[in-house]
Amino acid sequence: MKKTKMLKKNYQFKNLLRKGKYYSGEFLEAFIKKNNSKYNLLGIAIGVKLGKAVKRNRLKRLIRENYRAIENNIKSGYSIVFLWKKKQDISNANFKIIKKDINKILSSAKIIEEK
């Protein structure tokens, strides 16, 4: 069962970036905040200066797919925004790197359930 909805509005992103707790990986940054609901909210933001639309959309798909793979192990009731670090080259992105980074971030935030 899908228990995640996407963040879409600008004010939702701004609120989370202002009030959320910051976590950092090698390639990704994340802002995480408790949202007091039964589902998670996920936002993905990639800066325009990092590459053209095709590369940015590919990176968003990779992040979304990695999140979907571990979605059932994540505790409910959190808002999460993933950002690609501006210093990192977008062409270095692949599935394994992003998976390792997301697992590191979510485990340091203590919102991933170990089974």
Image: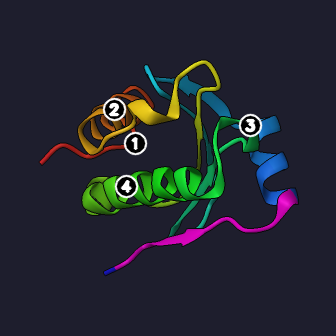
Q: Which mark is residue 107?
A: 2
Residue visible at 44% across and 60% down in the picture: 61
- Decide which of 14, 108 is in the foreground and name it: 14
Would residue 114 be found to the left or right of residue 48 on screen?
left
The amino acid at mark 1 is Ile
Name the residue type under label 3.
Answer: Lys
Give the mark nearest the N terminus, 2 or 4: 4
Q: Nearer the viewer, mark 3 or mark 1?
A: 3
Residue in the foreground of this view, choosing between 36 and 83 = 83
Q: Nearer the viewer, mark 3 or mark 4?
A: 3
- Up-down: is 100 above or below 43? above
Residue 73: name its quadrant. bottom left
Type of amino acid at the residue the image marks with label 4: Tyr
Residue, disc 4: 67
Q: How many labels does the image show?
A: 4
Real-space CA distance between mark 3 and mark 1, rounded to the nearest whole angstrom: 31 Å
Q: Give the range drawn in magenta.
A: 2-10
Q: Where is residue 25 in the image (x, y as percent from the top left)?
A: 45, 23
**Residue 111 — which label?**
1
Q: In this view, does 102 lie above or below 41?
A: above
Q: Which residue is labeled 3 in the image?
A: 49
Query: How much space separates mark 2 and mark 4, taking CA atoms?
Result: 13 Å
Q: Which amino acid does label 2 sit on?
A: Ser
